[in-house]
């Protein structure tokens, strides 16, 4: 009983002492509860955000006191001060948050713009209490957090450029064709058909192939036809006989210059396909009606009947179209062997003028020299007005850190809506730190690399999960970092495979978060090969436990 009386007296005494004068709040600072969140500060989108909570026990806060809290981020090279946070007792008539004498809590959030040096810092609260017009500082500041984590700044933020493909072919397929015509229901080759000008040109062309070491005839097709008028049975026999006489005629005209490769002979009994092509290309009246009949009926007999019923146009068909379908075609299929890689590289230095646009674009992929690539893309763009060349010229400038030159090259692109244009325009905006335009450009490009470039902006803006989703499985240089930022450590290590200080630095972070300090040391040995990374690691809060 005596003990309880003494204890009650002590409590009353504390209340009287603490409430008797606001300055007592400073002397009794140890009774104040202070907590910060997070305990380790993190820079997100170039900003540090933290909150703190003050807990006041019963009888601590004087009814007439004003408490002034100054959050200060102390870092190497300076201090950053957040707006003053004020609290007041129950009898103060100002408009600050009220803390009753019975006790309570007060929470506040502060933000600091990141500046270099804040990676080694701490957040402290400098508190003072006002007693009427007198300010009494608390004995010492309260430290609420260490900082600051800047791991996201390991992002490769230059962006990846996109090169438009060339259409260069090592082997180019060509054709040379001529034909002979027959009279109606005949399979006899008239002598004049073998002496007409187009046959002579065909013979001359075949002879030229013999002298051309880049071209060779791989096969020749002889196709004999019957026009689609008359009975189908008769047309089958007629086309077969025409194939025989056509082969004999071909042998005759190639006697002096035999062709290489197989000669294939085929027949088409009723040339409806040729009929449709000739009608479509003609100016015959009501040709649309004829073509509609062809599309409506597939049976040859029905087609023939319906067309003959159109007596007003059938005579025109019989005079102008059908005679052209009583024929045999000679089709030489040729392979042209284009310049080899070695020849293209040689031409790049000796005779660039004979190269066509596809050769120029392809040759640029064969050389490693920056200036030579620029020469090839510039020639392809200026000579052939090729947007692909100007896009690639933009890309090669960007890959070599030539931003002004890249902008000049991109300005020459006439089609400013291609997927390559949008991506490379986005990379330029990214390097100009115009992230709004960069996002707009990447969003318009259909290229996968544009989506990966968008993840860079996600990381810079603190949208780490979005970045992780966009980069998953891509092998992009930022994929491992995205996994670290989302704490998917087991996914990060398998993709951080490059043997460079940058990748080693991120592997060291993974192992530090896992608590595997021996592995941290191994990775930091590689990191120390780069002086900038070495200096960073010595202050990086990721390695705070390693340095203990």
Image (cartoon, grey):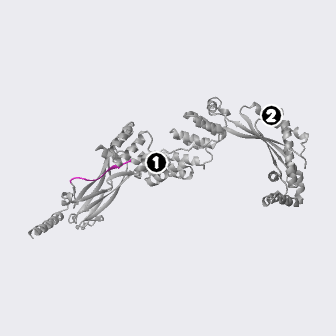
**Which residue is found at the position 88% from the left and 61% from the top?**
309
Of residue 279 and residue 295, the one placed in the foreground of this image is 295
Residue displayed at 11% across by 69% down = 5
Sequence-first tag of 2 and 1: 2
- Quadrant that contains the N terminus: bottom left
Q: Which mark is residue 271?
A: none
Residue 352 lies, with reference to residue 385, above or below; the image says: above
Q: Which residues are magenta?
A: 139-150
Q: List the residue tagged with mark 2.
A: 258
Residue to which mark 1 is pinned: 479
Q: Quadrant of residue 348?
A: top right
Specify whether residue 60 is in view. Answer: yes
How would you rate the neighbour count of disc 1 (Cα within 10 Å): few for under 14, some for 14-19, many for 20 or more? many
Observer able to see residue 484: no
Cα separation between marks 2 and 1: 62 Å
289 over 181 or under it: above or below: below
Q: Percent from the top left, x then y, of residue 161?
A: 54, 44
The one of 336 and 89 positioned closer to us in this rendering:
336
- SS at circle 1: helix
Image side of residue 547 versus residue 225, left or right? left
**Residue 45 painted magenta:** no
- 70 vs 403: above or below: below
265 to the left or right of 416: right
Residue 403 horizontal side relative to residue 6, left or right:
right
């Amino acid at each position: 009983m005596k003990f309880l009386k003494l204890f009650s007296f002590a409590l009353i005494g504390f209340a009287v002492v603490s409430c008797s004068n606001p300055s007592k709040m400073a002397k009794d600072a140890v009774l104040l509860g202070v907590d910060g969140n997070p305990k380790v500060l993190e820079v997100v989108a170039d900003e540090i955000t933290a909150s703190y909570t003050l807990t006041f026990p019963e009888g601590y806060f004087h009814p007439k006191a004003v408490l002034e809290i100054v959050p200060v981020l102390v870092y190497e090279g300076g201090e950053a001060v957040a707006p003053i946070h004020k609290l007041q007792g129950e009898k103060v008539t100002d408009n600050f948050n009220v803390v009753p004498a019975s006790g309570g809590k007060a929470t506040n959030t502060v933000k600091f713009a990141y500046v270099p040096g804040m990676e080694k810092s701490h957040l402290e609260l400098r508190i003072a209490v006002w007693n009427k017009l007198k300010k009494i500082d608390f004995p010492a500041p309260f430290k609420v957090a260490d900082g600051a984590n800047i791991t996201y700044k390991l992002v490769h933020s230059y962006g990846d450029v996109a090169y438009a493909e060339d259409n260069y072919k090592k082997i180019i397929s060509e054709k040379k064709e001529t034909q002979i015509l027959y009279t109606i229901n005949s399979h006899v080759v008239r002598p004049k058909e073998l002496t007409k000008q187009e046959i002579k040109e065909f013979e001359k062309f075949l002879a030229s192939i013999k002298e051309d070491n880049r071209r060779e005839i791989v096969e020749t097709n002889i196709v004999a036809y019957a026009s689609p008028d008359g009975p189908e049975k008769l047309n089958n026999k007629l086309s077969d006989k025409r194939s025989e006489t056509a082969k004999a005629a071909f042998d005759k005209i190639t006697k002096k210059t035999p062709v290489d490769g197989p000669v294939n002979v085929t027949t088409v009994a009723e040339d409806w396909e040729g009929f449709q092509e000739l009608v479509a290309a003609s100016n015959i009246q009501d040709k649309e009606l004829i073509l509609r009949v062809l599309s409506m009926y597939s049976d040859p007999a029905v087609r023939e009947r319906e067309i003959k019923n159109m007596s007003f146009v059938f005579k025109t068909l019989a005079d102008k179209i059908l005679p052209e379908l009583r024929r045999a075609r000679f089709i030489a299929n040729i392979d042209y062997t284009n310049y080899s890689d070695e020849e293209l590289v040689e031409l790049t230095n000796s005779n660039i003028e004979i190269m066509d646009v596809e050769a120029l674009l392809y040759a640029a992929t064969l050389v490693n020299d920056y200036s030579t690539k620029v020469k090839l893309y510039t020639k392809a763009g200026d000579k052939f007005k090729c947007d692909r060349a100007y896009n690639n010229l933009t890309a090669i400038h960007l890959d070599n850190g030539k931003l002004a030159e890249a902008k000049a090259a991109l300005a020459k692109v006439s089609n400013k809506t291609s997927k390559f244009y949008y991506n490379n325009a986005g990379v330029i905006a990214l390097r100009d730190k115009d992230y709004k335009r960069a996002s707009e450009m990447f969003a318009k490009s259909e290229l996968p690399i544009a989506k990966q470039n968008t993840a860079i902006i996600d990381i810079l803006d603190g949208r780490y999960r979005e970045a992780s989703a966009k980069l998953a499985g891509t092998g992009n240089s930022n994929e491992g970092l995205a996994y670290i930022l989302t704490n998917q450590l087991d996914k990060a290590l398998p993709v951080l495979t490059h043997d460079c200080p940058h990748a080693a630095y991120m592997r060291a972070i993974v192992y530090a978060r896992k608590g595997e300090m021996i592995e941290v040391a191994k990775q930091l040995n590689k990191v120390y090969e780069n002086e900038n990374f070495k200096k960073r690691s010595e202050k990086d809060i990721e390695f705070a436990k390693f340095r203990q």
